[in-house]
Image (cartoon, helix red, strand yellow):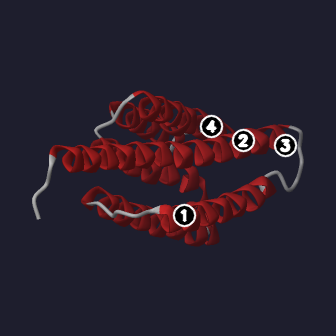
Amino acid sequence: MEMNENKALEIIENMISHAKREIKDNGFYHLMWGYLVFISAITDYFLLMRGIENHALVWGIMMPLGGLASFIKGLKDKKQQRVVSYIDDIMKSLVIAFVISLLIVCLIMPMTAKHWRSFFPVLMVVYAFSLYVFGGILQFKPLQFGALFVWLSAGIAFFVGYDYQLLLLAFAVLAGFIIPGHLLNLRSNSHV
């Protein structure tokens, strides 16, 4: 079968449309999780400062809600996806590795009181790793710069108390997830 100019242009337009959607979808997840973690960290901090005993309960509410929203969005996206690219496969593998790492840190580490103080710094290291790799895959420097800020925040967080770790986490997700997430959306709306 011969390909004419119109068919070739149609294929190129479809590829560009797919890439734009992929970039925008990444912006959605970065924004959603960024805002959830930011709100949770700030809420936890203020409840802690007011002496509320169950201050950390916000995490047990917000994170499962985020997981449910991600799952539903993922199912919706999968139904709409017509083409799976090599980049999609890489991103899927990275997301799976990130989620497994996150679950190990979030479910096992709190069980060991000995290491509880390192929970948020270790979490930030996992965040930074995924942000840096995502930024490389998407060729999007703001994610990689955000990752550097998150790594710096993690390094500092090992030496401060829980209250300051919450503030460092909030600013880390602002720099690593929220700002790059908005920039990803702007990028997908303007060009690929």
Q: Secondary structure at mark 4?
A: helix
Q: Is residue 144 above or below residue 127?
A: above
Q: Amino acid at mark 2?
A: Ile
- Earlier along the polypeptide chain: callout 2 or callout 4? 2
Q: Secondary structure at mark 3?
A: helix
Q: Is residue 45 above or below residue 85?
A: above
Q: Nearer the viewer, mark 2 or mark 4?
A: 2
Task: Report which residue position mark 1 lands on.
Answer: 74
Q: Nearer the viewer, residue 112 or 141?
A: 141
Q: Secondary structure at mark 2?
A: helix
Look at 59% across and 54% down and name the residue there: 117
Q: Is residue 61 left or right of residue 92?
A: right
- Earlier along the polypeptide chain: callout 2 or callout 1? 2
Inter-mark Cα distance, 1 to 4: 25 Å
Task: Report which residue position mark 4 lands on.
Answer: 170
Image mark for residue 47: 3
Q: Are marks 2 and 1 in contact (CB under 8 Å)?
A: no
**Picture coordinates of residue 98, whole percent (x, y):** 43, 61
- Earlier along the polypeptide chain: callout 1 or callout 4? 1
Q: Amino acid at mark 1?
A: Gly
Q: Nearer the viewer, mark 3 or mark 1?
A: 1
Task: Report which residue position mark 2 lands on.
Answer: 39
Q: Residue furthest left?
A: 2
